[in-house]
Image (spheres, grey):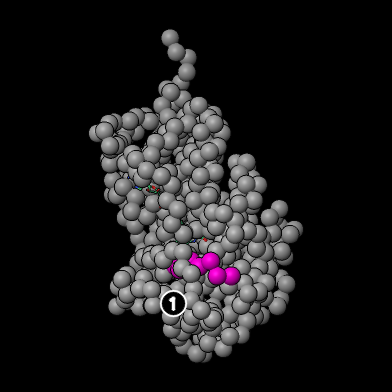
């Protein structure tokens, strides 16, 4: 007769092999727990999305043995700058180096999210108790008091898979979240964000800093350097679009050249490597857990990318959830311990991710000249005052969110602030 408890025999199932799904799987596998990841697509998505990885996240990736490779494949950047694009003046420069007594990583690392995902998958493959299946879509879920069951669709048909728990890391359109009937509270911005990736070295025009935010009442933009797959460096230019602009109009060669020349004038044409258009949301799931099923990453919360916080917080979800699940699965902690995940993560996302990204977007696009001037004065004053500068960065790097005492059920953070 087997002496292995049932919860060790049944794997923890994960819907979604994006960065949050595979980091969650790795954190569980390293605890000796059986995991099975189902990814709908046939390969890792390498569209330009997250790159900025903050200090608090780098510390967590250190715990998973990933940080050295993330740093090696990315670019270290201690600074970010905020500009007034209408005057061309630098408003404020912030320096994560000022956090050297707060973290082992006083900088951000620009490492594209597909690199992190591939790295985590490589590590996952070393564990005999971890399985990752591509081209396997989770279609429906059910659960009982002691197990979960999912229906998985592959090219050869559908099958049922049983597990002890299910983690929905299946992105913003999460099937898991919808199957649980959980509302995705918040709103979608009417405009879309366009990312144009160029091989032109924008650092020749904006030297000394690879993370720049340029505020403007009609036409803000932000540009960041990433190392690219071959390490030679690419620049991503992020900007907003008008409501009436179609994808065909926005991707048109001349329109793209015009947009790039408007932001960073140069002689000759830009070589454009990618053009990508994204809908932008501020939404948080009404619950992050129902019984044995959890939501993590974009399945649980989505936000605009200004500040680079969405994936960072998703990785923090993964670490917190796996830290709670391990002891419960091993029988060392009662199942009620898992309530903490929803009680803690949901208000934390609203307080740190939704509030900051909404404020960042407002500052970038502010139309009222008085409010713009006030914003710039405040930013400049914050950057000039060492105490305020450090406090601002502790929040921007999510270190403050990680340090926040765990006794959080603050009613102020039960809903997303309006736009
Ligand atoms: C332009 C842009 C820039 C960004 N920049 C940053 C940044 O600098 N820093 C930052 O922290 N965040 C950033 N983000 C946010 C970041 O990209 C997301 O938070 C991140 O992708 C979330 O990871 P995830 O694994 O939760 O979801 P996803 O990356 O969406 O992965 C979900 C996975 O689940 C799979 N899937 C979906 N449905 C199913 C199903 N039914 N069954 C099985 N698999 C399924 C999908 O194929 C996908 O692979 C940015 C986002 C955008 C759009």
Q: Is residue 141 left or right of residue 405?
A: left
Depth check, front residue: 212 or 232: 232
Q: Write the start and end of the magenta stretch as one range.
A: 195-201
Quadrant location, the N terminus: top left
- Residue depicted at x 38% and y 66%: 277
Up/down of 186 relative to 6, above or below: below
Please give the name of the residue rendered at 45% of the width and 53% of the height, measured from the top-left corner: 46
* Residue 356 showing in the rendered view: no
| Circle 1 residues within 10 Å: few <14, some 14–19, many ≥20 | some
Residue under the point 48% across and 48% down: 19
Does the stretch in magenta take in 50?
Answer: no
Q: Position of residue 104 (x, y in %)?
A: 71, 53
Q: In front: 219, or 397?
A: 219
In the figure, residue 166 lies in which quadrant?
top left
The x and y percentages for residue 335 are 45, 35
Which residue in the protein does label 1 denote? 257
């Amino acid at each position: 007769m087997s002496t292995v408890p049932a919860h060790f025999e049944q794997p923890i199932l994960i819907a979604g092999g994006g960065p949050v799904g595979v980091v969650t799987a790795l954190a569980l596998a390293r605890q000796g727990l059986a995991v099975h990841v189902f990814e709908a697509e046939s390969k890792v998505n390498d569209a330009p999305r997250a790159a900025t990885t903050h200090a608090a996240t780098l510390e967590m990736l250190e715990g998973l043995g990933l940080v050295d490779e993330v740093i090696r494949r990315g670019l270290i950047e201690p600074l970010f700058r905020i500009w007034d694009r209408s005057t061309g003046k630098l408003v404020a420069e912030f320096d994560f180096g000022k956090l050297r007594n707060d973290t082992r990583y006083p900088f951000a690392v620009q490492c594209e999210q597909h690199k992190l995902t591939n790295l985590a998958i490589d590590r996952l493959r070393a564990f005999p108790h971890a399985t990752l299946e591509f081209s396997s879509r989770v279609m429906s879920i059910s659960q009982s008091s002691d197990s979960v069951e999912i229906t998985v669709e592959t090219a050869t048909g559908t099958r049922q898979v049983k597990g002890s728990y299910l983690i929905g890391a299946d992105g913003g359109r999460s099937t898991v979240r919808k199957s649980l009937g959980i509302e995705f509270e918040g709103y979608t911005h009417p405009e879309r964000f366009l990312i144009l990736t160029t091989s032109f070295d924008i650092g020749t025009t904006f030297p000394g800093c690879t993370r720049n935010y340029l505020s403007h009442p009609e036409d803000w933009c932000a540009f960041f350097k990433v190392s690219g797959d071959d390490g030679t460096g690419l620049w991503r230019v992020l900007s907003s679009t008008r409501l009436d602009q179609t994808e065909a109009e926005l991707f048109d060669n001349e329109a793209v050249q015009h947009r790039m020349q408007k932001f960073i004038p140069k002689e000759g044409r830009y070589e454009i490597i990618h053009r990508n258009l994204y809908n932008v949301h501020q939404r948080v799931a009404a619950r992050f857990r129902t019984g044995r099923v959890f939501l993590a990453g974009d399945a649980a919360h989505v936000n605009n990318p200004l500040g680079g916080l969405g994936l960072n917080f998703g990785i923090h979800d993964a670490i917190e959830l796996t830290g709670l699940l391990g002891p419960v699965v091993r029988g060392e902690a009662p199942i009620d311990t898992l309530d903490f995940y929803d009680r803690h993560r949901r208000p934390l996302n609203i307080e740190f991710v939704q509030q900051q990204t909404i404020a960042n977007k407002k500052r970038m696009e502010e139309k009222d000249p008085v409010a713009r001037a006030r914003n710039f004065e405040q930013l400049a004053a914050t950057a000039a005052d060492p105490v305020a500068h450090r406090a601002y960065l502790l929040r921007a790097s999510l270190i403050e969110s990680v340090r926040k005492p765990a006794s959080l059920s603050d009613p102020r953070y039960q809903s997303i602030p309006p736009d």
